[in-house]
Image (cartoon, grey):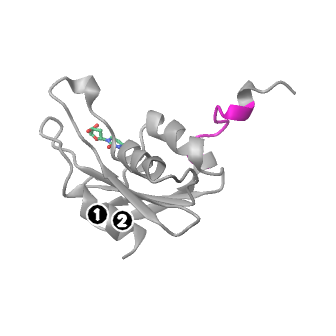
Amino acid sequence: MSLLDAARTVRENAWAPYSKFKVGAALRTPSGAVYVGCNVENAAYPEGTCAEAGAIAAMVAAGETEIAEVAVIADSPDPVSPCGGCRQKLAEFAAPDAPVTMATIAGVTETRTISELLPGAFRKSSMEKG
Ligand code: THU
């Protein structure tokens, strides 16, 4: 199964009764393992979590901490763009040149690197004195 198909499949499980906007995310690590996540909303709106956050949590829970590639999909008019917070979360574990494929259910895709999505990311190194 492709990374995008994994994202498409997990999207079906999204819990999005408030926004009605289901998102699926899948990420591959250098080991070849794939971790998936979907958005999980909450009646207390700010407690909802994004699909990317779920996939990252699954990866870290499995003992992995490096993202090689990401796919995100939603039924959006344009390929779904990770929110600002998710760009920061992805940048924690992905190299600047790691590809992120954004997709629509209709079949439109767009691929950008992490550094294109979050130029000048604040990283661990940002806190280290030169
Ligand atoms: N959402 C994600 O899961 N990932 C993103 O990068 C964009 C937004 C979710 C959060 C919320 O459940 C719904 O989409 C509408 O914002």
The numbered mark at residue 78 is none
The furthest residue to the right: 130
Displayed-image quarter of ligand 1: top left
Q: Which residues are magenta?
A: 116-125
Say which label, 1 or 2, has the lower sequence index: 1
Q: Is residue 26 above or below residue 1?
A: above
Q: Is residue 46 above or below residue 62?
A: above
Residue at the (19%, 23%) spot, across then down = 44
Residue at the (64%, 36%) spot, across then down = 121
Q: Secondary structure at mark 1?
A: helix
Most prominent secondary structure in the magenta stretch?
loop
Residue 5 appears at what percent x and percent y? Answer: 33, 70
Residue at the (67%, 36%) spot, across then down = 120
Residue 1 appears at what percent x and percent y? Answer: 36, 76
State which mark lies toward you, 1 or 2: 1
Residue 21 appears at what percent x and percent y? Answer: 21, 45
Residue 6 appears at what percent x and percent y? Answer: 33, 66
Residue at the (36%, 57%) spot, across then down = 36
Q: Is residue 57 above or below residue 101?
A: above
Q: Which residue is mark 2?
A: 108
Q: Nearer the viewer, residue 90 or 81?
A: 90
